């Protein structure tokens, strides 16, 4: 069954930074990616693994989903990360640069039954997205837009046209298999307006949320990926109107000049469930 928890804001935290590990306990994020890969320099990797293990053992992250990103299994330390993560017992382990489902098989041999997440950030991953997302242990996908842009040798555009084929394929693959999918990071962490545009675009496409690099980005993502007051109000009115016509034996209602059929009611119910899950998150 699809994970019903909210994933509006998914914050990367370098596993090597105790201050940031502490700070995250106070931030209203839905999920955390504790990073052992690119946010940690080569000479800090060993220490980061120990720092992170201790932080997770001590706990204090509340209802936030805890995901650990390890180094690639073909890189130095990757296999040791995987074995260590199995002991840390987070909610999931995130593998970088997944190219095919075989990469996930190799990981699960080391991490056992722990749910798997995949970084989608290579051209091959975009082309294999359907097979990757169908892996039985995969629970979520994260767009790695910086690596993807690097591989494509594309340029940054605020409309993300060069990345759109890949983003679209990955959204289709995730939805076809009922797993979570979160969008890539917005590098300019002081540019609130640019972040909002990119969050709104991701939300419009169907992403569950956005990966973030800095606490200043959290509120913008939380707002963009939550149902708005208007959406909640419309959903309630659609459900009520449909129930009313259904009672008279009809299958179509009209709200604000637009038809409401059974399928729109399903969307409306999903909006209300998401709003409820977000409210529950705030209470923890
Ligand atoms: N998670 C949690 N806390 C964070 C954080 C993060 N990603 N980034 C910064 N903070 C904390 C800082 O520790 C600091 O806390 P304090 O008030 O207790 O001192 C506070 O937020 C303000 O930080 P600030 O001084 O504005 O940022 P910085 O200069 O220390 O760091 C970055 C800026 C970009 C280097 C840092 O945000 C970072 O490392 N982000 C993650 C990068 C990453 O994970 N990349 C890999 C995936 S793309
Ligand atoms: Mg990457």
Image (tube, rainbow, N blue to C red):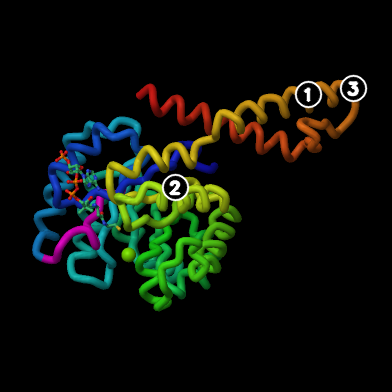
Q: Please tell me how crowded label 3 is: few (under 14), some (14-19), or many (20+) other residues with Cα within 10 Å.
A: few
CB contact under 8 Å: marks 3 and 2: no
Front in this rendered view, residue 257 or 71:
257
Considering only order in the chain, which callout, 1 or 3, is on the residue closer to the N terminus?
A: 1
On whether residue 12 falls in the magenta region, the answer is: no
Which residue is label 3 attached to? 248
The secondary structure making up most of the magenta span is loop
Which residue is label 1 attached to? 243
Measured as percent of width and height from the top left, residue 52 is found at: 17, 47
SS category of the residue bearing label 1:
helix
Front in this rendered view, residue 190 or 168:
190
On whether residue 41 falls in the magenta region, the answer is: yes
Residue 67 visible, this angle: yes
Distance Cα–Cα, label 1 vs label 2: 36 Å
Asked if the residue at label 3 sits under 8 Å from ligand 1, the reply is no
Q: Please tell me how crowded label 2 is: few (under 14), some (14-19), or many (20+) other residues with Cα within 10 Å.
A: some
Distance Cα–Cα, label 3 vs label 2: 44 Å
Residue name at image x 21 percent, y 40 percent: 56
CB contact under 8 Å: marks 1 and 2: no
Considering only order in the chain, which callout, 2 or 1, is on the residue closer to the N terminus?
A: 2
Q: Nearer the viewer, mark 3 or mark 2?
A: 2
Measured as percent of width and height from the top left, residue 33 is found at: 30, 49
Q: Where, by quadrant of the figure, is residue 20 drawn?
A: top left
Magenta-colored span: 33-42
């Amino acid at each position: 069954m699809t994970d019903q928890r909210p994933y509006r804001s998914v914050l990367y935290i370098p596993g090597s930074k105790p201050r940031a590990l502490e700070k995250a306990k106070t931030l209203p994020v839905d999920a955390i990616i504790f990073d052992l890969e690119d946010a940690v320099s080569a000479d800090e990797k060993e220490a980061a693994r120990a720092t992170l293990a201790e932080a997770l053992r001590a706990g204090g992250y509340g209802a936030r989903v805890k995901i650990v990103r390890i180094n690639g299994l073909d890189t130095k330390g990757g296999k040791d990360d995987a074995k260590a993560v199995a002991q840390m017992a987070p909610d999931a382990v995130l593998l970088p640069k997944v190219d095919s489902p075989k990469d996930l098989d190799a990981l699960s041999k080391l991490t056992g039954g722990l749910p798997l997440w995949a970084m989608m950030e290579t051209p091959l991953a975009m082309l294999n997205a359907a097979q990757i997302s169908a892996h039985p242990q995969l629970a979520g996908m994260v767009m790695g837009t910086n690596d993807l842009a690097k591989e494509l040798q594309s340029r940054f555009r605020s409309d993300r046209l060069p990345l759109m084929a890949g983003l679209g394929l990955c959204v289709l693959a995730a939805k076809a298999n009922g797993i979570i999918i979160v969008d890539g990071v917005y590098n300019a962490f002081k540019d609130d307006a640019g972040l909002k545009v990119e969050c709104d675009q991701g939300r419009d496409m169907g992403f569950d949320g956005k990966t973030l690099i800095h606490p200043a980005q959290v509120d913008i993502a939380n707002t963009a990926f939550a149902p708005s007051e208007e959406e909640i109000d419309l959903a309630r009115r659609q459900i009520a109107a449909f129930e009313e016509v259904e009672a008279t034996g009809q299958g179509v209602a009209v709200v604000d000049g637009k038809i409401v059929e059974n399928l729109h009611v399903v969307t409306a119910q999903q909006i209300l469930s998401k709003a409820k899950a977000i409210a529950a998150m705030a209470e923890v």
